[in-house]
Amino acid sequence: MMLGFRTLLGKEVLRFWKVSFQTLLAPVVSTLLYLLVFAQVMSARSEVWPGVSYREFLVPGLAMMAMLQNAFANSSSSLIQSKVSGNLVFMLLAPLSPLEIFAAYALAAMARGMAVGLAVWLVTLFFFPHVPAHPLEVLLFGLLGTLLTGVLGMLAGIWAEKFDQMAAFQNFLIMPLTFLAGVFYSIRALPPFWQSVSRFNPFLYMIDGFRHGFFGYSDVAPLESLAIVAGSAIALSCSALVLLSRGWRLRH
Amino acid sequence: MPDRGARAGRAGEAAISIQGVEKSFGALRALKGVDLQVEQGEFFALLGPNGAGKTTLISLLAGLSRPDAGRLAILGHDTGSDYRAARRLVGIVPQELVFDPFFTVRETLRIQSGYFGIPPDRAWIDELLENLQLTDKADANMRSLSGGMKRRVLVAQALVHRPPVLVLDEPTAGVDVELRQTLWKFIRRLNGEGHTILLTTHYLEEAQALCNRVAMMKEGRIVALDTTRNLLAAHSHPSLSFGVAGDLPLPPALAARAQALPGGRHRLALGDFAEVEQVLAACRQAGLQVEDLEVGQADLEEVFVAIVSGAAQGRIPS
């Protein structure tokens, strides 16, 4: 059943697995460096929430940031590399439906994001032992968050025709949205105006909901975050499916 | 190779059917109403100068582009509305030398087979590798292969799902003579087993040697469509090349028709081979001694140049 879909999914997973130093290990190391530097510099800060030190607060945010960035990177880099080198033609010649293509790229991106998240969490256990208060919530936000950015990466990969365009998408949209989504701070610490601005950033809800799964505290009600994240993921998925069905920028 | 490509389509359906197809890219009208039918089992050549629309037509057949107007079908399956069935029935060898640098040759073939919903068949993949002289490169990364080897992997990828229709878009561009011969031997064999082959090439001697029928395109239109034999008979003539002892001038009647060749030789286009004797008789009557005689065969290149330059009118059966 659906061998075409399973093959494309397997190929996309194998693609990042073959270069796992770059796709899995490097993000874990970067995240650890962020953690060590920020935790050291900000060690004097008071608890963010009752019983939650700043160092502990940082871990889920950094883990989620790495997950979101890597899910985005997986689908976007695969598509743009295939487009630029021309080997996307092999997939386009095959009798794969738009839904199969969408699902394979989305699931592969989620797999990489979740693998990075799991690795970050396991490594940080050595430094700051912490067990999620609501593991299912962590899993749910992890899956939805990586789906959302994986699909965003797919949209960027479909749109971009040059590496330069992809870099612009990543540096001017994804990076600011993740850095300004409360990874390093609680938005309650911001002035009211910036709190309101932050509310327009969908990445805030992914990170905040994910963090709630760890500590049971959040800046936004978890159900509200869940609704916004799920709604955004569905909207982006529908957009990606429409573009794949039309063959926009893929088939002339 | 048992009944591989002969997994034929519906009886009586054309292998490839193209009806009234138009395609524009902005202001450029790449295809201006193309009608073409390739029957099952044919070895068919699609010829034309660069920019004639051959690759655009193949992209439409492959589903890489969508037509602005008209219909394309593979063995009766519309390439748009019934794309899954149509794509399963055709293998395309693209013109560009593309490959995925993450994978080995065998992985590439296994993946391509899976894309088409066919569990990778090790025996068939081994057979393809052997026939394309790639066995010793099966586990090599695609990046490490030479251009000719990558081209052969593209052929293997197009065949890995055992399609009854195979489209080769300039498969021998940049391939050395030995590899070309290997490739054509294999493709001929596939054709003999029932595969329909559609070939575009700039090597017209290949098309002449391999293909039963030829279509010539120019500026987005088919300008000639006939059997190779009929095209040669209608547009190409034998020729006689010769020298004359002492470099004496030809009789005026021959001199008016002759084309000067290097070394003081002459070339005459003939209506048919019977004219050879008439030319020799005219020379004898003029007291000339003919030497270094060579009778040239008609060739497709001559036909192609004549039709594409507009000097001759192609025939398009209704």
Image (cartoon, coloured by chain):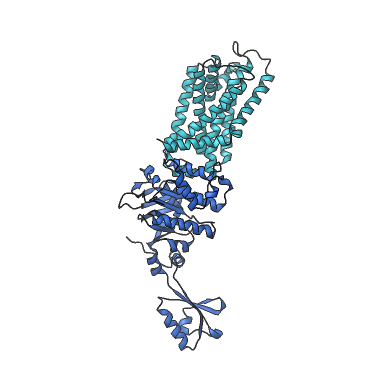
Chain colours: A cyan, B blue
Give the residue drawn at x 48%, y 53%.
B131
Picture quarter with the N terminus of chain A: top left
Q: Position of residue B261 (x, y in %)?
A: 53, 76
Residue B127 lies, with reference to residue A182, above or below; the image says below
Q: Position of residue A163 (x, y in %)?
A: 57, 40
Q: Is residue A249 visible?
A: no
Total numbered badges shown on the rendered structure? 0
The residue sitting at the left extreme is: B12
Residue B257 lies, with reference to residue A22, above or below; the image says below
User: Which of the two residues, B290 or A84, is positioned nearer the viewer here?
Assistant: B290
Q: Is residue B218 left or right of residue A44?
A: left
Among the 4 quarters of the image, the one containing residue B217: bottom left
Picture quarter with the C terminus of chain A: top left
Q: Is residue A42 visible?
A: yes
User: Which of the two residues, B224 or A11, is positioned nearer the viewer here?
Assistant: A11
User: Which of the two residues, B177 or B233, is positioned nearer the viewer here?
Assistant: B177
Give the residue drawn at x 68%, y 16%.
A43
Q: Position of residue B183 (x, y in %)?
A: 48, 56
Residue A101 lies, with reference to residue A41, above or below; the image says below
Q: Position of residue A11 (x, y in %)?
A: 50, 37
User: Which of the two residues, B261 or B137, is positioned nearer the viewer here?
Assistant: B137
Residue B21 lies, with reference to residue B316, above or below; the image says above
